[in-house]
Amino acid sequence: MHTDVPRIDAALVERLIAAQFPEWADLPVREVDPQGWDNRTYRLGDALSVRLPSAEGYVAAVEKEQDVLPYLARRLDVAVPEPVGLGEPGDGYPFPWSVRRWLDGTVASRAIGIDHRRFAEDVGAVLRQLRSIPATGGPVAGAHSFHRGGHPSYYGTEVVAALDALGDGVDREACEEVWERAIASRWEEPDVWFHGDVAPGNLLVTVDDDDGGNDHGAARLSALIDFGTCGVGDPACDLVLAWTFLDAPARRVFHDAVGLDADTWGRARGWALWKSLIMLAGSAGPGDRAEHEAVLAAVLADPVV
């Protein structure tokens, strides 16, 4: 990870835009809330956004997204970010960065009035459509995707270390049973597209005016954002939303909508287990402990299939 990254703020964005995209220099820059972990995002005027990697480990995603987003956008029914400019390092900022079209909507984690079962159906349908897109020549899962789309066993040492650190704080036997099932199978089909981080913060919803205006349940999935960890490989990593955001009835809907087999769901459960364990063990950035405890409880209680 690069240790000399300057402070990323609106003033830096203004300087970078003025130097490299003077046609947009008069547009106001506003910080987006909530911010992601891998990148910092700023709104540029009403129609654009600027996205800057927060560390060197996330740089590979910039040019990858420039290539794959237009390809995927033409083949998906929901909106995805549209790149309109690729910035170069400058003004002390050492990484490439990007300008995209702004997408309206509210991240699902903050939206009010979501019908979780209908939301699960929407997301499942999009993931099924994503898998149907020809994957030949796509970026094969690897370091650029933080090994999402690969086999969960890549993180086996982290699972063991987290279990050792957590000790009696978790049901180790139950966790090991989930993990053993996760690593016992592999994706035997041809590689397919995966998003890599199907989290409520990367799913935008808008109100469907044809379905009740602002009434409860009117929020519908409108966009899938942050393809920094996307690639082609095993789609199991895209199913963790089942435990991180959906309740039990919505998980059943998601399962039916996404159309994947029991082994893939077993690997998905392993991905969710890994993430909750390392977060609880304190080995991967900040997080709300209660949230990760709830995810772990859901993973252990509900295999979905």
Image (cartoon, rainbow, N blue to C red):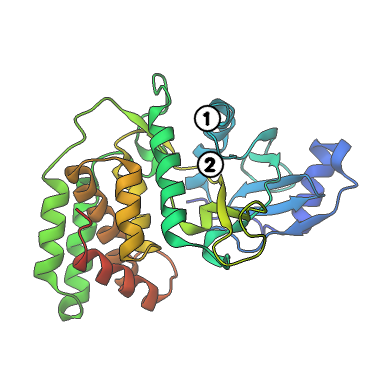
Instruction: Answer left or right for 271 relative to 207.
Output: left
Residue at (65% x, 47% y) in the render = 51
How many numbered tags mark residues here?
Answer: 2
Residue at (23% x, 48% y) in the render = 265
**Residue 211 percent coordinates (x, y):** 61, 55
Q: Which residue is mark 2?
A: 59
Instruction: Answer left or right for 102 relative to 19.
Output: left
Q: Earlier in the sequence, mark 1 or mark 2?
A: 2
Residue at (67% x, 60% y) in the render = 213
Residue at (57% x, 38% y) in the render = 62
Instruction: Answer left or right for 14 relative to 225.
Output: right
Local crowd at mark 1 within 10 Å, few (<14), some, or many (≥20)?
Answer: some
Quarter assignment of residue 193:
top left
- Residue sitting at the far top: 136
Q: Which residue is mark 1?
A: 72
Q: Nearer the viewer, residue 236 or 257?
A: 257
Mark linked to residue 279: none
Local crowd at mark 2 within 10 Å, few (<14), some, or many (≥20)?
Answer: many
Instruction: Answer left or right for 117 relative to 58.
Output: left
**Residue 138 percent coordinates (x, y):** 42, 25
Q: Rounded to the nearest whole Å, what is the CA distance between mark 1 and mark 2? A: 20 Å
Quarter assignment of residue 8:
bottom right
Callout 2: SS: loop
Quarter assignment of residue 246:
bottom left
Question: Which of label 1 and label 2 is nearer to you?
Answer: 1
Callout 1: SS: helix
Above-or-below relation of 62 to 68: below
